[in-house]
Amino acid sequence: MASVKAPMAVPQDRDLSIDFARAFCLPIVVLLHAMQMGIGGDPLRAFNALQGFQPLAWATWPLMIMPVFFICGGFASITQWRRLRRRGETVAHYVRVRAVRLAKPVVLLTACVALVLAGMTMAGMDASFVQSFAIRLAQPLWFIPVYLICTALVPLMSRLHSRAPYPTYLVLAAGAVLVDVLARGAHVPVGALNWLFVWLFAQQLGFGLRDGWFERRSRWTLAAIAAASYGFIAVLVVVFGYSHDMLDNLNPPTLAILGLSLGQACLFALLQPAIRRAMTRRAVLGAVVVLGVYGMVIYLWHTFAMAVVVSLQLVLGLRYPPVLSPAWWATRPLWILAIAAIVALCCLVVPRVERLWPAPSVRRTPLGAVIVWLAFAVAGVAVFLLFGYVPFGYTAAGWAMVTVAVIALLIGGPGVAIRNGARRESEGVAAPANL
């Protein structure tokens, strides 16, 4: 069938191939999270069902696509930052916009998941099972605080990119090397620093993609860099004892993820012409738009869907077959369909509920205050990562911290009113992507 040009007004600084990459990667991430949820044992507990599953371990070399999110995020973030700068906006305004957009959806999600888990507890479920289940459900939230920090640093990293792009890449890569040497070789507990070095490196690759560095390279050069990147990962695995499972290299990220980021950036650049052609088809464009509009809902609320499905299984007394058994694999299609159905319902309901939040104030917030409230939001989400969604103790404090931070960012602070154009940007009307 011939290509059908879709009539769509696309901003000049927007590349639809970036939207395609995000839309393509989102279902993979959600599907992986759903497949990893294992429940079983005596007493019952929640765990990673795919831990040690070798076919998946090798499949993570092409399927571990979290770097793509940070690469595309770098592209979108620097685009938005430059657009705001042209309008005369400040660093504080940009960081506030990003913080609100990323942290606000967490408030409603965590409250709803906590309610489901509270219902399980009141129904007499074993507390240790609920705790293990709560922690498993919260793990996908790691993306929010890391992405918040990386995007908040976009103004600084953008300036470094403009003035000294290659030294910036080298310093970030050297930092990741040093952290891995200390953490793996000397057993110094500094591995968490690579949440910053590795993902900022991936974000900088997005800056390079935005400025056409990859597009100016020949296809042979891009292919050679991609091959060298995967070869680098192979050396890390064979010579230096890194895990061949990229999921093991993700928490915290290691040099293997840094190499994967560079390789994926080159492969994406190689595929960009074909992706742009595909985006001229109405069906492809429509699917990408839908996944883009509901991306945050899908990413965050699939954990709520898993909580609901497991609760229904317990209420109905359905048994849990041993993970990776034939019976377990046979039930996975129904498990995925049930989660997808609830996520689809969330896509209809959640945006309408979120619109009940007050619109962001048109008053500016001082940069110092924005940084304080950003830190509160990051710390609050970190509490969920450590303790899970169970609605008492530390996790209640985490929910309160995120909620207070979002409200403070929405209220704004003293100063002159934001112009109408910037107000539209802050409300997401002109944003290049919802992440």
Image (cartoon, rainbow, N blue to C red):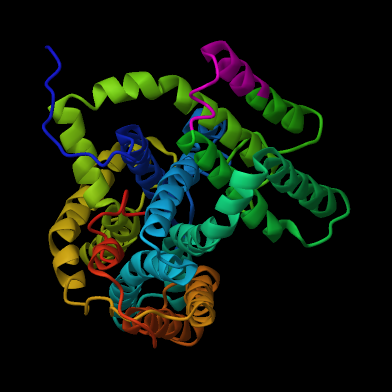
Is 38 or 415 nearer to us in this picture?
A: 415
* Res 285 seen here: yes
x and y percentages locating residue 414 in the rendered image: 39, 88
Is 155 or 147 nearer to us in this picture?
A: 155
Is 309 or 230 nearer to us in this picture?
A: 230
Residue 81: image quadrant is bottom left
Q: Residue at x 32, y 49 (%)?
A: 432
x and y percentages locating residue 59 in the rendered image: 51, 29
Q: Residue at x 17, y 71 (%)?
A: 355
Please say whether residue 216 is one of the residues in the magenta stretch. yes
* Res 323 seen here: no
Q: What span is in magenta?
A: 212-228
Residue 428, compared with residue 10, is above or below; it is below
Residue 356: image quadrant is bottom left
Horizontally, is 63 left or right of 318 in the view?
right
Horizontally, is 383 left or right of 10 in the view?
right
Horizontally, is 184 left or right of 107 in the view?
right
Residue 256: image quadrant is top right
Please say whether residue 419 is one of the residues in the magenta stretch. no
